[in-house]
């Protein structure tokens, strides 16, 4: 990969880390479009527990795993800002590693002869 | 208690229907890997990783929509399709959903197939069909690209939301008394508004990338205008 592409990659990652690590703390905490549609028909108390009515959200069951980063926070970190921000930073790095790693593994390696040789020859030819 | 569930949680759709969609999602992803490999070279692979990481980040940024008490967030299908193409794009969104389900407790693991079908498969497919159509008729200007991104993103969000409504009709766990129209209505209206936000984010991001590195926008590379150079070369006329 060319140097300029590395610059773009690093710049893009920094933007993503900033968004997930800092800006995420200013996100709306209201339920999203899906969640709010599923809550339609029920009433809720101040703690957000269902107090009555009939709605799809009543059937909601526990998550199978949960885990220390569940709900975009870090278990044991009391500071909300840090908890959300750090979980976001970890999520960005993990997603980049998993997606980038998987894509790198399945990428097309210049198997056809023309493709394998073309990138090697072109610059050499131009230089001479 | 504040829970941040963005995707379909466990218990919302019954097991058999979730299993059917898991099979559909798995088949679609396998096909996307086969087709996407042709696009994935040494340069696109890390970029696709970045696109997935960026979608993860922006999905955390719930924005308010005009309806009181409801927020929305990026789904990312149109953005991914524009930047890395439909096949790799669908895989990017799917990786984000897998990481969210396995590590962040967001979206049931048993519901993963439903979520992937709606957002990674439907959302990306609809977006790319629109992108392909619009980029051929609209001028190759930042405005043309912005309109393409906005429209494809907005429509893809609404279609993904309707995907959920279909799944709920097939396997919803609460008897809504035959009143699925109510759920369809609230989903459609809220996701039309979320789609506007998705459209603005997608257009801003893609136009920015196109300004810095137009060669990194897959849709601009892959989709040539319908009429190649109908206007005589601007510089040559004078």
Image: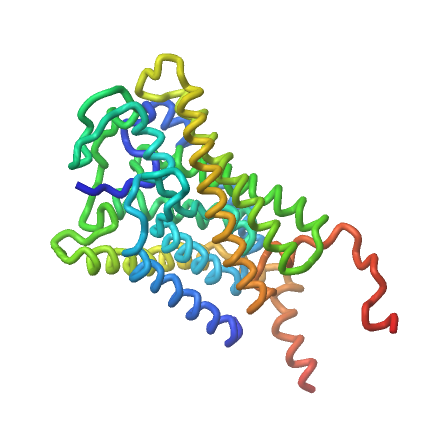
- Which one is in front, A76 or A79? A79
Examine the rendered structure and indicate whether residue A78 appears above or below residue B87: below
Tell me which residue sits at (42%, 45%) in the image. B94
Q: Which image quarter is the C terminus of chain A in?
A: bottom right
Examine the rendered structure and indicate whether residue B29 appears above or below residue A4: above
Tell me which residue sits at (53%, 63%) in the image. B208
Examine the rendered structure and indicate whether residue A109 appears above or below residue B184: below
List the single residue furthest toward the bottom.
A128
Q: Where residue A37 appears, x then y in whole percent?
A: 36, 30
Asked if one can make out residue B29 in the rendered structure from this viewpoint, the answer is no
Q: How many numbered discs? A: 0
Tell me which residue sits at (43%, 70%) in the image. A11
Q: Where residue B177 appears, x then y in whole percent?
A: 35, 12
Q: Where residue A56 appears, x then y in whole percent?
A: 30, 24
Q: Where residue B110 appears, x then y in whole percent?
A: 31, 33
Q: In this view, does A15 lie to the left or right of B132?
A: left
Tell me which residue sits at (21%, 58%) in the image. A81
Q: Is residue B157 left or right of residue A41?
A: right
Q: In this view, does A100 lie to the left or right of B38?
A: left
- State the scheme by which the image is colored: rainbow
């Amino acid at each position: 990969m060319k140097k300029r592409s590395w610059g773009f990659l690093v710049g893009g990652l920094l933007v993503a880390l900033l968004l997930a690590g800092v800006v995420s703390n200013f996100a709306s905490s209201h339920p999203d479009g899906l969640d709010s549609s599923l809550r339609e028909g029920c009433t809720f108390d101040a703690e957000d527990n269902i107090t009555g009515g009939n709605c799809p959200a009543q059937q909601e069951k526990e998550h199978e795993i949960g885990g220390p980063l569940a709900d975009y926070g870090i278990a044991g970190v009391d500071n909300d800002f840090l908890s959300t921000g750090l979980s976001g930073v970890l999520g960005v790095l993990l997603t980049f590693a998993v997606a980038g790693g998987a894509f790198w593994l399945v990428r097309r390696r210049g198997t056809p002869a023309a493709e394998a040789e073309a990138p090697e020859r072109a610059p050499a030819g131009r230089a001479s | 208690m504040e829970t941040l569930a963005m995707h379909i949680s466990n218990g919302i759709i019954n097991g058999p229907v979730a299993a059917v969609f898991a099979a559909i999602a798995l088949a679609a992803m396998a096909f996307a890997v086969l087709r996407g490999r042709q696009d994935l070279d040494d340069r696109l692979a890390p970029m696709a990783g970045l696109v997935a990481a960026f979608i993860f980040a922006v999905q955390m940024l719930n924005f308010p929509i005009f309806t009181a008490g409801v927020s929305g967030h990026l789904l990312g299908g149109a953005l991914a399709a524009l930047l890395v193409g439909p096949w790799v794009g669908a895989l990017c969104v799917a990786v984000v959903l897998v990481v969210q389900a396995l590590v962040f407790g967001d979206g049931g693991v048993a519901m993963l197939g439903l979520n992937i079908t709606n957002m990674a498969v439907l959302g990306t497919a609809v977006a790319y069909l629109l992108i392909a159509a619009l980029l051929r008729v609209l001028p190759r200007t930042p405005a043309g690209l912005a309109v393409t991104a906005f429209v494809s993103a907005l429509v893809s969000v609404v279609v993904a939301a309707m995907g959920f409504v279909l799944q709920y009709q097939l396997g919803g766990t609460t008897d809504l008394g035959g009143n699925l129209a109510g759920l369809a209505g609230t989903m459609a209206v809220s996701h039309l508004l979320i789609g506007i936000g998705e459209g603005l984010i997608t257009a801003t991001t893609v136009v920015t990338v196109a300004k810095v590195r137009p060669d990194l926008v897959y849709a601009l590379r892959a989709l040539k205008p319908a009429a190649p150079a109908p206007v005589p070369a601007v510089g040559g006329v004078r």
